[in-house]
Image: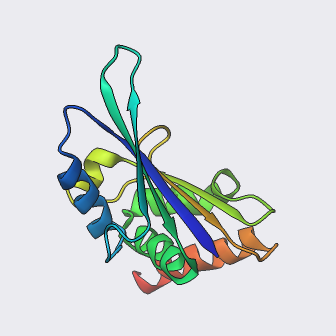
Amino acid sequence: MRGIISFIIHATEDEEKVVKAIANALKIDDLMASLSTQRLTGHFRNPILYVKWLLPGKRTYEAVESVLRALDATDKVYLERHLEEFADKKGNIYLRLKKQDLCLGRIALSNAGGIKIYAKIKDKEILKMLEMKVKKVLDTES
């Protein structure tokens, strides 16, 4: 399993604060080990920082698991009912999280933008595995 977490930071946001908040929420211990950044220019010539973390297997699993555990009941039910929107048969998991909520210490699914989490799992039965994981998280909280 390997993973990528990516997001953008706008000029009006505190880079260090955003990176630390996301690292804390996703349980990424060593902030800079696999962090890469790219400075870009927005549509109105505003500076934008593109941030990308490459996560090895165990860290990817821990990040995905921490997201699943931290979701509120509504997001967990939505994820369980719409797994095909979040995973494909090739072993890819796609999650989007609300950046502002993450910066406030909460984890919530998002439809667009925000924090993108991509995880590649070698197992071709990804939907079954993810479904079992979501059900396990739901069952342990009931």
Residue 11: quarter of image: top left
Q: Quadrant of the N terminus?
A: bottom right
Examine the rendered structure and indicate whether residue 128 appears above or below residue 17. below
The image shows residue 10 at horizontal and vertical percentages of 29, 34
Res 73 visible: yes
Q: What residue do we see at 46% from left, 79% from top?
A: 62
- The residue at the point 39 percent across, 64 percent down is 71
Instruction: Work out which residue is located at the far top of the displayed protein and give it.
Output: 44
**Relative to 105, residue 38 above or below:** above
Count of residue discs: 0
Image-quadrant location for residue 88: bottom right
Quick check: can you spot residue 106? no
Colour scheme employed for the rendering of this structure: rainbow
Whole-percent x, y for residue 77 in the image: 51, 61
56 or 60, which lies in front?
Answer: 56
Apparent side of residue 48 relative to residue 85 in the rendered image (left or right): left
Horizontal and vertical percent for residue 16? 20, 54
Image side of residue 51 versus residue 95, left or right: left
x and y percentages locating residue 29 in the rendered image:
31, 77
Identified at 19% across, 32% down, the residue is 12
Residue depicted at 31% across the width and 69% down the height: 31
Left/right of residue 3 with respect to residue 67 in the rendered view: right
